[in-house]
Amino acid sequence: MKWVDSREIAIALAEKFPDVDPERVNFVDLRNWVVALQGFDDDPKRSGEKILEAIQSAWIEEAD
């Protein structure tokens, strides 16, 4: 997975953290969780607010 795979990342996060409300996750935790996902293979420094917002938004949609 790369940073641009926001939907795939969101699904992985929803599966790994089923009891977490994605609307309440701060970007520092979100970034750390994404980097730690099995199958994530991108430069951790390439993340930014816009990318993290896209991932969080996709995760919120998955949770609904």
Image (spheres, helix red, strand yellow):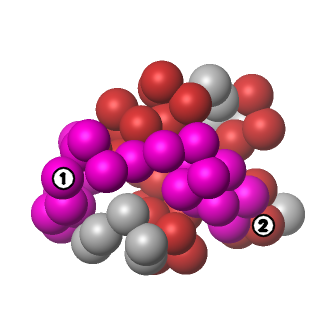
- Residue type at tag 1: Asp
Q: Quadrant of residue 3?
A: bottom left
Give the amino acid at mark 2: Glu
Which residue in the structure is indicated by mark 2?
A: 61
Judged left or right of residue 46, residue 39 is left
**Residue 43: mark in rendering:** 1
Residue 30: image location, x then y, percent: 49, 36
Q: Is residue 21 magenta?
A: no
Q: Is residue 53 magenta?
A: yes
Q: Is residue 40 visible?
A: yes
Where disc 2 sits, the SS reads helix
Residue 42 figure quarter: bottom left
Residue 54 x/y as whole percent? 64, 61
* Mark 2 crowd level (few <14, some 14–19, many ≥20, 10 Å Cα): few
Residue at 15% over, 63% down: 41
Label 1 element class: loop
Considering only order in the chain, which callout, 2 or 1, is on the residue closer to the N terminus?
A: 1
Magenta residues, start to end: 36-59
